[in-house]
Amino acid sequence: MNQVYDVIIIGAGPAGITAAVYAARKKMDVLIVTRDIGGQASWSGDIQNYTGYQFISGPELALKFEDHMRKFDFKIKENEEVTELISNNHVKLIKTNKGEYRSKTVIIASGKRSRELGVPGEKTYKNKGLTYCATCDGPLFTGKDVAIIGGGNSALDAALQMLKIAKKIYIIDVAEKLKGDEIMQEKLRANKKVSLFNQYRVKEITGDVFVKAIKIEKEKKVQVLNVEGIFVEIGLMPNSDFATGLVKNKIKEIKVNQYNATNVPGIFAAGDVTDVPEKQIIIAAGEGAKAVLSAFHYLNTNR
Amino acid sequence: MKKIILYGVSGCPFCHKTREYFKNKGVNFEDIDVSESPEKAKEMVEKSGQMSVPVIDFKGEIIIGFDQDRLEELTEV
């Protein structure tokens, strides 16, 4: 309980894991606190732009990251959610849903999570017909009518996955035009199962124990679609709520400089939770390495 | 029914974690891919009262998601 680590890494996606590997090589005393291992990479489909692998699936790459990390003898607190981060000069205090930990430096690599719709019924029907992971839960909707919310690549990808299994697919998007790749749009348009609802907003999700319908609206005209499955694919939100003392941009990403330093000395951040311009696995991994090397230099100069 | 059953799909990371967890602990379990069987998918929904994977039927106790703490408690016994 009283131990003060050199560094606590929050999150174990590509950024957090890479930071941990670098920290181990610098012989830093590390604690990893994370909800899961692999992060968003675990949920990705096919990856064709991670150097060294011409082709690898997301879950496979995530497992390789995890294997690499497990080569070192880290203390890992898995299934823990950070609720508070307090900086008392040289010692940082991290509170989670299960405990409290102290360290000299912190690397926030907590990534992003699915954005929610924020409409009535969403919480009630989560996992009862409403899901944020088409890859996981899609097969449970075989032969059923489903709605896909969103118009980007992840939404279209979900729709394509459902083509083979669902009966009818409604794509509901607030924008005038879908944003996803044209090649995916073409495939969907050519299929009779698919109906497009552009410029529609989701108003409510209703049902009994499970989802039965979705209420959507365009220009104040409400329409009800009977569906048993709803796939929410409307982008991502940074997991930065616990980092209350840090400067963030408009979309709640933590601001970092080129050394991955935040506005609080000793607290660094890396990967998708930050305002780094591109969100890519390889970039997150590189940022994780940079962040922990910065933390290492910080420790050497602030002893 | 004193069996351990894992209901999952092949592409789902938490199903994979559960599978690996059981294998590492040397726990015998039935591995069901619900995407291959609508009846088993229905069975899973009926048992768990919800529609996300994985679901673990641990000798009658239903666990939703990869809940390592709960699994540890159960496998210790």
Image (cartoon, coloured by chain):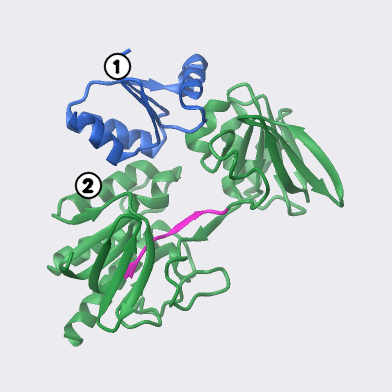
Q: The disc labelled 1 sits on which kind of residue?
A: Lys
Under circle 2, the secondary element is helix
Residue annotated with mark 2: A67
The residue tagged with tag 1: helix, strand or loop?
loop
Give the extent of the magenta segment: A107-115
Quarter holding residue A27: bottom left
Q: Residue at x 19, y 87 (%)?
A: A301
Residue A244 point in image, percent of width and height:
45, 73
Residue sitting nearer the eye, B36 or A106 = A106
- The blue chain is B
* Between marks 1 and 2 in the image, the one whose residue lies nearer the viewer: 1
Q: Colour of chain A?
A: green
State the quadrant of the N terminus of chain A: bottom left
Q: Tell me if A215 is positioned left or right of A294 in this view.
A: right
Residue at the spot of label 1: B3
Query: Is label 1 in contact with label 2 (beta carbons under 8 Å)?
Result: no
Please name the amino acid that badge 2 sits on.
Asp
- Horizontal side of A178 relative to A218 (left or right) equals left
